[in-house]
Amino acid sequence: MKTNYQIVLDKKLEEIKNNNKVPTLLLHSCCAPCSSYCLEYLSNYFNITIYYYNPNISPYEEFKKRALEQIKLIEKMDAKYPVKYIIAEYNNDDFENIVNGMQNEKEGGKRCSKCYELRLKNTCMYAKKNKFDYFTTTLSISPYKNSDKINEIGSNLEKEFNINYLYADFKKKNGYKRSIELSKIYNLYRQDYCGCVYSKRSRDEYGKREN
């Protein structure tokens, strides 16, 4: 039976609320637009630190542009509890090394799963080292990303590193729709490809088919 991760998240948030404590959350963010709804939603329950670790994004100028949009959103957005951010070091080789041999995989396939795992593992390790209560990612807000796979990876890391993973499917409850609304409110740059050269190639090929 397929897990409804929104129900899982609802139960966890109710538990946190009843404990009358505000835990810390390291929230991996792929970009400002995707993080917008997640921040609006989760900042009512957590002290959040955004962890912007995205070595998949290429070229570097695109990585930097998205990072600056992330900072802009955090500085402008109201939140119940203050939101901090960390812009992790950029090294595209981290991504290229783990997807070597998968360059021609279809978008959304094994290459993407490896990318999710790379970014989530780095987030998990940082959270563990710096004693965060929870870690999670904004990735599940995208209707183009496999939430079951993302949560499976998070679950495996939770067990391996003994740190709480916050299960979620942020596209539920109109999360993706709300992220589009918030992007307009805060005038955020919304990219039209996931970030890597292979997703950009897929976008370009799709554009050619449309023309």
Image (tube, grey):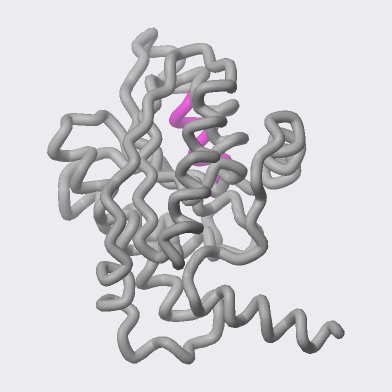
The answer to whether residue 1 is seen in the rendering is no
The answer to which quarter of the image holds residue 208 is bottom right
Q: Point out the residue furthest to the right here.
A: 211
In this picture, residue 135 sits left or right of residue 163: right
Q: Is residue 120 above or below residue 24?
A: below
Q: For the point 33% across and 57% down, which residue is it?
A: 119
Q: Point out the residue furthest to the front here.
A: 61
* Residue 5 position within the rendered picture, expressed as x and y whole percent measured from the top left: 53, 47
In this picture, residue 18 sits left or right of residue 135: right
Image quarter where the N terminus lies is bottom right
Q: Nearer the viewer, residue 54 or 115?
A: 54
- Magenta stretch? 5-13
Q: For the point 58% across and 74% down, which residue is it?
A: 200
The answer to whether residue 48 is seen in the rendering is yes
Q: Nearer the viewer, residue 15 or 173?
A: 173
Q: Nearer the viewer, residue 184 or 79?
A: 184
Q: Is residue 45 above or below residue 188?
A: above
Q: Is residue 14 above or below residue 149?
A: above
Q: For the point 28% across and 62% down, which residue is it?
A: 91
Q: Main secondary structure of the magenta part?
A: helix
* Residue 106 position within the rendered picture, expressed as x and y whole percent measured from the top left: 54, 85
Reply yes or no: does residue 63 show up in magenta.
no
Q: Point out the residue furthest to the top here.
A: 20
* Residue 7 position within the rendered picture, expressed as x and y whole percent measured from the top left: 56, 40
